[in-house]
Image (cartoon, grey):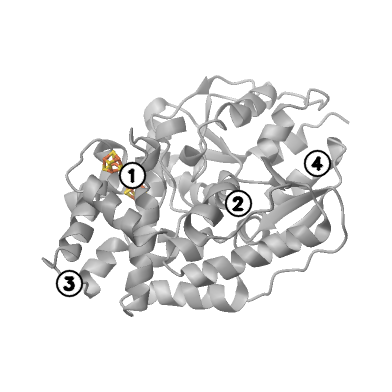
Amino acid sequence: MDITLANGTADNCRYCLMCRHVCPVGHVTRLETLTPHGWGLTIASQRRGMAEWNEENAEVMYQCADCGTCRANCVTDQPFPDTIARVREELVGLDLAPKKVKETADRLQQWSNPYEEQEPTAATGTGDTALFVGDEAAYVGADGLAAAKRLLTAAGIDAVAVGHGRSNGYLPSSLGYTDLAAEIARANVAEITATGAKRVIVLSPGDYYAFTTLYADRLDVAWPADVEVVELVALLADDDSLSLGADDADGAYAYVDPTHSVRMPDRHEAPRSLAARVLTGEAKELFWRKERAHPVGSTALQFTDPDLANHLTWARLGDAKQVGVGILVTEDAGTLSHLSAHASRFGIEVRGLYELLADRLDA
Ligand code: SF4
Ligand code: SF4
């Protein structure tokens, strides 16, 4: 991201309160410093020579979730999350990134993912359609991945798996390791190009955002112009031939918009319509949903500030308690794993949308 644009954005945000109420980190911490205008002021103060970067304010800069909710609610579309990532890049250059940030970046550097000490599995084969697996589905969402593959088969789609075990590039970008993020992004693009695919199916809004927006806006990595990116939920929702049976025993449920959903304003109805095809219970809505959806802890915070990440997840589960649902449904592997890790404390059952759909495919 251009530094002039980043500085201008920080200036625009520093005295603006218009998205303060939607920032999930401000919401759970109740600290003014940890709101868009608070971070904007910190950046603007450093730019004006009123403060110097040090370990303490670097820590503060790493507490933004880079979730996109501020920008999704900004009438002037300020790229504030990109600005945060750009400032973190500066902090990395000054060797001020917190220890856990460096450790996470080291794992990404070595393994292209932060979860397992394992190289990505190279794609084999060619075809019109590729399925981007990434690292979350590979390492924390194996059941959802298997279900997604069954759904593709049922829909008559033969897809070559790509990027199995490799980050989509968002995480290193969010940590301020732009060169590393670009390297990983280029590896994804090269693997997809080598398959000859003209369509890439993704399993989460995070992957869709990375490929369609982040690569260009933050990394200067060109996505191939003739390759379409489509979310699996959008594809399935449009497929009338898919025969799905409903279960009469379901109670009231709510769909959880996965982390990064706010970055895609047109995606909200597809997963809801799919959930309604297989769940007969009443569909309720969380308060923090759709264009104001809050993330769970599945951003970089899960590695750099796990306590804050947990608070974001607990807030989503608390939202579900407040609207009176006992079942939460979502499809993104990261969101599912974070909700599932804490759901029992709240007496809530968490279900994977891909698993639900695949289990109810009519024979
Ligand atoms: S992102 Fe937009 S609404 Fe939020 S503080 Fe900046 S200018 Fe204001
Ligand atoms: S990206 Fe998310 S956490 Fe960061 S300032 Fe915006 S709304 Fe708040």
Mark 3 beta carbon near ligand 2 (under 8 Å): no
In the rendered structure, the answer to whether residue 314 lies left or right of residue 180 reads: left
Mark 1 beta carbon near ligand 2 (under 8 Å): yes
Query: Label 1 to label 2, Cα distance in Å?
Result: 24 Å
Q: Earlier in the sequence, mark 1 or mark 3?
A: 1
Which quadrant would the C terminus be assigned to in this image?
A: top right
Which quadrant would the N terminus be assigned to in this image?
A: bottom left
Q: Earlier in the sequence, mark 2 or mark 4?
A: 4
The mark lying in front, picked from 1 and 2, is: 2
Residue 211, label in figure: 2
Query: Label 1 to label 3, Cα distance in Å?
Result: 27 Å
Q: Name the residue tied to disc 1.
A: 24
Query: Label 2 to label 4, Cα distance in Å?
Result: 21 Å
Q: Earlier in the sequence, mark 4 or mark 1?
A: 1
Q: Nearer the viewer, residue 285 or 190?
A: 190
Amino acid on which disc 4 is placed: Leu
Does residue 329 lie above or below 216 as drawn?
above
Query: Label 4: few (<14), some or many (≥20) within 10 Å?
Result: some
CB within 8 Å, label 1 to label 3: no
Q: Earlier in the sequence, mark 4 or mark 3?
A: 3
Residue 24, given in percent of the width and then of the height, sits at 33, 44
Residue 320, given in percent of the width and then of the height, sits at 43, 33
Q: Name the residue tied to disc 3.
A: 52
Residue 314 shows in the view: yes
Query: Label 1: few (<14), some or many (≥20) within 10 Å?
Result: many
In the rendered structure, the answer to whether residue 206 lies left or right of residue 353 reads: left
Q: Name the residue tied to disc 4.
A: 152
